[in-house]
Image (tube, rainbow, N blue to C red):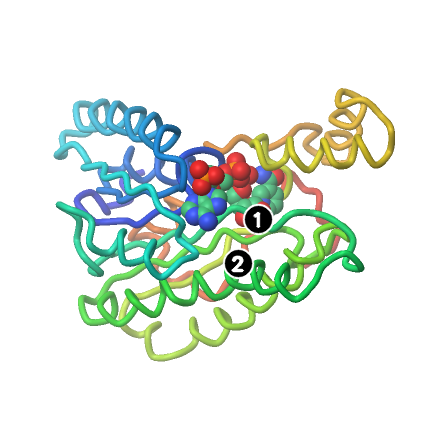
Amino acid sequence: MDLAIAGKWALVCGASKGLGFGCAKALVDNGVNVVINARRPEVLDEAAKLLIDVAGAAAQRDGFAAAKVIAIACDITTVEGREAVFSADGGPGKNFDIVVTNAGGPPPGDFRDWDRDAWIKAVDGNMLTPIELIKATVDGMAGRGFGRIINITSSAVKAPIDILGLSNGARSGLTGFVAGLARSGIAAKGVTVNNILPGKFATDRLEGNMKVAAEKSGKDMDTVRQAQQAVVPAKRFGHPDEFGALCAFLCGQHAGYITGQNLLIDGGMYTGTF
Ligand code: NAP
């Protein structure tokens, strides 16, 4: 399916690996120019090299110009980090057509151990940073008549996980904000905003969470991994490419009537009817 977005510009945050990288890869494969970011330059540069290869292969296959890939190493949760991506050399400034927000997730733990600073950090990374990125780009999108905003949140928004209290809380704030924004004037101007809610995906983040679970329970990693896969009806973890494919579809021209949604991608793990 031609998503008809070749040549557009996307900002993909937290994109050196995991789900963010999956989104950047799927967008580049559809001819979308990307500014990617993450904090560690060496990991980000490796990711950029892989994306440039994907862009070249896609251009040859589909006959469009190879997507440009710009890598900016910075912490997207800071004012300076956001300024750096918006002033990237060769980038579109704030005139992005697509914004994928993501900044890693807050650490797991027990809420009794979290102080105000821990909460502020979680709210900053998982609620206020996406809102700042949207604020900087959404009116430009509306003015140009096309825009796609995707927030990577978590299945924990729909089915909270006790040890992820910081994530449950901060992301619910973003979800409420997005629900209102999506139904505001931007909807009539070609701008959609949706959240994608991952279940269990094979990334370093999931490995880290499983390590905590293993330490807490005294079980080895293989036992924990098998137990976690067993609770997923698909009996496996998701692949970041599967996540990226959904993200790219929502960013495409065919998805213009999907807005304000929270789309679970979890191998069937959420047990509710709706
Ligand atoms: P991951 O594999 O750990 O990747 C996180 C990416 O974000 C890396 O590129 C990381 O690079 C970057 N990053 C982290 N903090 C950043 C910051 N402050 N500024 C810029 N970049 C930053 O994680 P993931 O599994 O892809 O998870 C992505 C999101 O989905 C997270 O919010 C996570 O909580 C959520 N999620 C994941 C799962 C899952 O099963 N994987 C399930 C539910 C929710 P640097 O460290 O170099 O900055």
For the point 26% across and 52% down, which residue is it? 84
Q: Are marks 2 and 1 in contact (CB under 8 Å)?
A: yes
> Is the residue marked by circle 1 packed among few (<14), some (14-19), or many (20+) residues within 10 Å?
some
> For the C terminus, which image quadrant?
bottom right
Instruction: Tell whether circle 1 marks a residue whose Cβ is less than 8 angstroms from ligand 1.
Output: yes
Q: Which residue extends farthest bottom? A: 185
* Image position, residue 125 (x, y; %): 50, 57
Query: Going 16% across and 32% down the picture, which residue do you hit?
Result: 66
Return the mark for residue 105: 1
Q: Is mark 2 within 8 Å of ligand 1?
A: yes
Residue at mark 2: 126
Q: Quadrant of residue 52?
A: top left
Q: Is residue 234 left or right of residue 4?
A: right
**Dot label at residue 87:** none
- Image check: 215 left or right of 240? right
Q: Residue at x 40, y 49 (%)?
A: 75
Looking at the picture, how far across and down is residue 128, in whole percent?
Answer: 47, 66
Q: Amino acid at mark 2?
A: Asn
Q: Is residue 192 visible?
A: yes
Secondary structure found at label 2: helix
Quarter of the image where the N terminus is located: top left
Quadrant in the picture for residue 68: top left
x then y, percent, for residue 74:
35, 46
